[in-house]
């Protein structure tokens, strides 16, 4: 059939029409457990009542002002997000990639104006296997051939070092380096958790060299890891933290750079902006997201259910049904033995049994259910995974 849709995705053959909590329903009325949760944009599940209510109230009041005019929720959103994360300033954008671009601009301008790096010479150190979005600058420092092929010329100013190797990272820093940009746990790469001492060593290397630590918590943040931010797992604080995905409650794109006012205050009027960034609807939903996170039960749920999830996955590894499993909280990357099928084939078999997951990089599956998932539902999805992997 002729499609009017550009072919930049190859979704599983399911057409969803409704969602509630961890469940979605297709056009034939078949129900599925959603174990992808919009790549963690749906941490609170589909249509969380508090988030939908906040959006509906705001829809009847004011939806957009542009930043040319102020509105009643913007300063409050900034204050409450900063207070949740112990930061002193934030800058609102829409998509994750825009938050990353904003941090790159902020770090470079800080490098020139504060650190004294010569004009246009700033470098940023990044990690192999990174995923920070799809803009031309961001794919410039990716090492994923699919993400780059045909999109050059690429932006200079980035140095890539192996993820998890703090010595290599420290080695790559020099007088031109303004920032280290990392995902504390790499999501797209397959939920790669770095070695225990890594992030602290990175923080120390940044402090020693006078370099900003920018942590992209767009996928790892806001409860996914059983902590508010993944960096808390190692007691590390970033200079700039990037949020997105779950910040919009699965309703609309909301992203932010949150961190040190000594950096963000350099972005003075006219230097950076966004028509939709910080719009009233985004702020209303974002404030409701902050309210949910403040309650603490989502984060606790992710931690407790996450322990259960990883215990069950470890059993699948010991029994030989999985090659490897990684992760923390309600977040796991599973490597499937090619003898049991490709990641895609396993996802198709799971779909036929009512469980939706997504493969990444061929043989890896990611489990990232909404944090509201019931334990019984998680267990039944894991039973289904066990059946599919054992060919039953
Ligand atoms: C999804 C993601 C992004 C990009 O977010 P978009 O909203 O798709 O632009 C950036 N960084 C990480 C770690 C992500 O997971």
Image: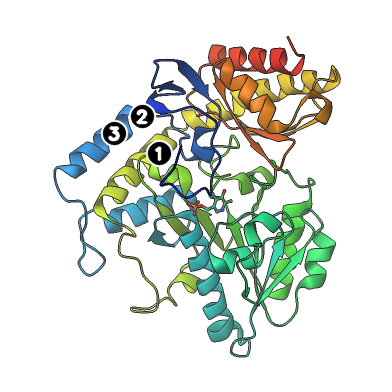
Q: Helix or strand or loop: what does disc 1 sit on?
A: loop
Query: Closer to the N terminus: mark 1 or mark 3?
Result: 3
**Proximity of marks 1 and 2: CB atoms separated by less than 8 Å:** yes
Outermost residue toward the top in this view: 392
- Return the disc, 1 or 2, that comes first in the chain's sequence: 2
Residue 350 x %, y %? 62, 20
**Quarter of the view holding residue 334:** top right
Q: Which mark is residue 52?
A: 3
Marks 1 & 3, CB-CB < 8 Å contact: no
User: On the picture, is 364 further left or further right than 119?
Assistant: right
State the residue in front, 132 or 175: 132
Above or below: residue 102 compared with residue 218:
below
Question: Residue 365, labelled with which disc?
Answer: none
The residue under the point 60% across, 67% down is 151
Residues at discs 2 and 3 in contact (Cβ within 8 Å)? yes
Badge 3: few (under 14), some or many (20 or more) residues near its Cα, within 10 Å? Answer: some
Residue underneath mark 1: 250
- The image's colouring method is rainbow
Q: Which residue is mark 2?
A: 48
Q: Check disc 2: other Cα within 10 Å, few if <14, some if 14-19, many if 20+.
A: some
Q: Is residue 383 left or right of residue 60?
A: right
């Amino acid at each position: 059939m002729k499609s009017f849709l550009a072919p930049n995705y190859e979704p599983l053959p399911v057409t969803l029409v409704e969602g509630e909590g961890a469940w979605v329903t297709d056009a034939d009325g078949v129900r599925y457990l959603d174990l992808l949760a919009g790549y963690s944009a749906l941490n609170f599940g589909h249509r969380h009542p508090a988030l939908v209510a906040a959006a509906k109230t705001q829809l009847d009041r004011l939806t957009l002002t542009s930043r040319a005019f102020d509105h009643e929720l913007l300063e409050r959103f900034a204050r409450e997000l900063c207070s949740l994360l112990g930061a002193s300033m934030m800058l609102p954008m829409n998509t994750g990639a825009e938050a990353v671009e904003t941090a790159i601009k902020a770090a470079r301008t800080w490098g020139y104006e504060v650190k004294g790096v010569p004009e246009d010479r700033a470098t940023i150190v990044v990690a192999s296997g990174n995923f920070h979005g799809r803009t031309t600058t961001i794919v410039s420092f990716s090492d994923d051939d699919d993400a780059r092929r045909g999109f050059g010329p690429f932006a200079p100013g980035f140095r890539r070092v192996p993820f998890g190797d703090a010595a290599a990272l420290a080695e790559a820093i020099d007088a031109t380096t303004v920032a280290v940009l990392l995902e504390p746990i790499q999501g797209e790469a397959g939920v790669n958790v770095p070695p225990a001492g890594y992030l602290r060593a990175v923080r120390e290397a940044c402090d020693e060299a006078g370099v900003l630590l920018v942590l992209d918590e767009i996928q790892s943040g806001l409860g996914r890891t059983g902590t508010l931010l993944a960096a808390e797992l190692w007691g590390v604080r970033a200079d700039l933290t990037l949020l997105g995905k779950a910040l919009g409650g699965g309703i609309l794109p909301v992203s932010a750079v949150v961190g040190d006012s000594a950096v963000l205050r350099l972005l003075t009027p006219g230097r950076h902006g966004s028509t939709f960034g910080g719009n009233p609807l985004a702020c209303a939903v974002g404030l409701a997201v902050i309210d949910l996170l403040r309650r603490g039960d989502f984060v606790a749920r992710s931690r407790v259910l996450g322990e259960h999830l990883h215990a069950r996955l470890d059993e699948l590894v010991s029994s030989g049904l999985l090659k490897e499993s990684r992760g923390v909280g309600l977040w796991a990357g599973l490597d499937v033995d090619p003898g049991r099928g490709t990641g895609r084939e396993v996802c198709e078999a799971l779909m036929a049994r009512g469980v939706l997951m997504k493969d990444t990089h061929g043989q890896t599956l990611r489990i990232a259910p909404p944090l509201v998932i019931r334990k019984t539902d998680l267990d039944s999805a894991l039973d289904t995974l066990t059946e599919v992997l054992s060919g039953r």
